[in-house]
Amino acid sequence: MALFQVKLVHGPCNGQIKAISQSDWDLGETTCKRAVYVWDGLPNHKDGVRWFLYAPKAPPLPGSGAGVYAPRATKGWGAIQNAVNRGLPTAQRKIQGLNSATSAALARQRHR
């Protein structure tokens, strides 16, 4: 099992280097002393490790209590909502128009 070194910034574990699992690395979140730390989104800093920032208002991660905190997921959710609420109806109208035009053209050719 691969372990990754991260630096915890602020909060109760400020300045500590922690080895985290592949799943925590992929999730971009970890805990220390029941506090949640979230990856700051930047590649490695000058010290060569990723920084995980204290997230004081984050609910505990699964396994440490109820709730999920996924800051990057909410940005993706906005893109999905936009695609479904705006892009999909527009595409459906275009498809319906093409289907109507195709049906009309086929009907004209049959009656010749």
Image: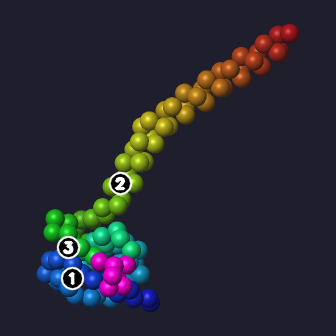
Q: Residue furthest left?
A: 12
* Magenta stretch: helix, strand or loop mostly: loop
Say if 17 sits above or below 40 in the image: below
Numbered badge on residue 75: 2
Residue contact between numbered discs 1 and 3, judged by CB atoms under 8 Å = no
Is 58 placed left or right of 44 in the picture? left
Q: Quadrant of residue 81?
A: top left
* Quadrant assignment for the N terminus: bottom left
Q: Residue at x 86, y 9 (%)?
A: 112
Q: Position of residue 75 (x, y in %)?
A: 35, 54
Q: Quadrant of residue 26?
A: bottom left
Q: Residue at x 22, y 87 (%)?
A: 16
* Kind of residue at badge 2: Lys
Numbered badge on residue 32: 1
Residue contact between numbered discs 1 and 2, judged by CB atoms under 8 Å = no
Compute the Cα span from label 2 to label 3: 20 Å
Which marked residue is nearer to the observer: mark 1 or mark 2? 2
Compute the Cα span from label 1 to label 3: 9 Å
Secondary element under disc 3, as helix, strand or loop, is strand
User: Is 29 within the magenta?
Assistant: no
Numbered badge on residue 18: none
Numbered badge on residue 54: 3
Q: Quadrant of residue 4?
A: bottom left
Compute the Cα span from label 1 to label 2: 26 Å
Which of the marked residues, 1 or 3, is nearer the chain's N terminus?
1
Regarding residue 20, the answer to whether it shows in the image is no
